[in-house]
Amino acid sequence: MVAAGSPAGIAHRAGRFTAPGRRIAAALSAALMLAALTGAARQPAVSYPVQAVFTPPGPYGTAIGTVTNASGTAVYDLFYPSHYAALGFMSPIVTWGNGTGGTPAAVSVFLQHLASYGFTVIASTLPNTGSGNEIDAAAHYLVAQDSVTGSVFYGHLNVNEVAAAGVSQGATGAVRATTNDPALIKTVLTFSEPNPIWAAPNPDCPTAADCTAHPAALTRPVFFISTHGFWDSIIASPATQKAFFLSTSVHAALGIILNSDGKPADHTSIQNPALGGNPGGFLGYATAWLEYQLRGNLTAAGAFTWGASGTGLQHQLARQRHQVSQARTADI
């Protein structure tokens, strides 16, 4: 395979703070919803530290590239820092899974956003990624590239810090990739992971079982994100996300977004604005999760842990509960 990059415009890791059974849920949902309701996303001055820090573009220029197979077909799209020497740290890897019929280009705003924070993102070009196989294979491709002399990634990647992420069917695939390859993938981030009743055979999955995820089997930390939108109420409802969350025994977080960029959030909001998406309200907390999990960022950790750094909206949820009356508001 050959990687070709082109400009796209513009350390050492601390502890993960992960402990068995550590939970955070509806209060984080409140943080996300409240930030959106008050117009926090994409505003220069906001009340929520995580939104304020991680919603604006990161400090690093970005580049894009494509990986082609022997026949010249694009198999992966790449989003990465344009000058690795400027990072001052080894770049963590994020492997992305598309929703049904989706493309990496459709979510390039989000993926380039991650690159601007120093992450190297690889995204399968396949429109069906529910098996998780291509998501895992993409991560292994980048790990191998770190050792290939002449590769733009040579010696620049933190091959021990890898996350899987995806939307809809790709969220299912991200969970499957993480449960199947926990030795490589250290955390998972899902956007609107569908209720398993929607699993069905497709070109990536010979049977429905091959496109069914089991969050309860996760052995790595997970952040479930969904919305109160109409389509998510059918495909990936808040109740479904809470069920996923409560089924896990790992460090887990749950965020339910009401509004994003001043509009109701829904199943395809993570897509680019040019395609009708409104991703702004998702950027801050999603980026923070990856900063926390893959780089040990203390500000980011404060949104997902109880008292880790005194920043962000924090709440620890007892395992048997799924409703929280209020969030901590010391930093609002």
Image: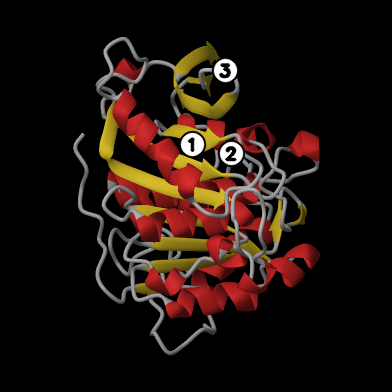
Query: Which residue extends farthest bottom?
Result: 320
Residue at (63% x, 71% y) in the render: 195
Q: Quadrant of the N terminus?
A: top left
Q: Tell me which amino acid carries mark 2.
A: Phe
In this rendering, does residue 83 appear at all? yes
Q: Could you say where residue 129 lies in the image, as x and y percent from the top left?
A: 58, 48
Left or right of 39: which side holds 184?
Answer: left
Q: Which residue is mark 1?
A: 114
Distance, label 3 to label 1, CA atoms, is: 30 Å
In which image quadrant can residue 239 be found? bottom right
Q: Could you say where residue 244 lies in the image, as x and y percent from the top left?
A: 51, 74
Q: Which residue is mark 2?
A: 110
Element under disc 3: loop
Q: Could you say where residue 77 lies in the image, as x and y percent from the top left?
A: 55, 28
Q: Tell me which amino acid carries mark 1.
A: Leu
State whether residue 285 is above or below residue 89.
below
In which image quadrant can residue 193 be found? bottom right
Q: How many residues crowd mark 2 within 10 Å: few (<14), some (14–19), many (20+)?
A: many
Q: Which residue is mark 3?
A: 71
Residue at (52% x, 82% y) in the render: 324
State whether residue 258 is above or below residue 125.
below
Residue at (36% x, 62% y) in the render: 221
In this rendering, does residue 46 appear at all? no
Label 2 near label 1: C-beta < 8 Å?
A: yes
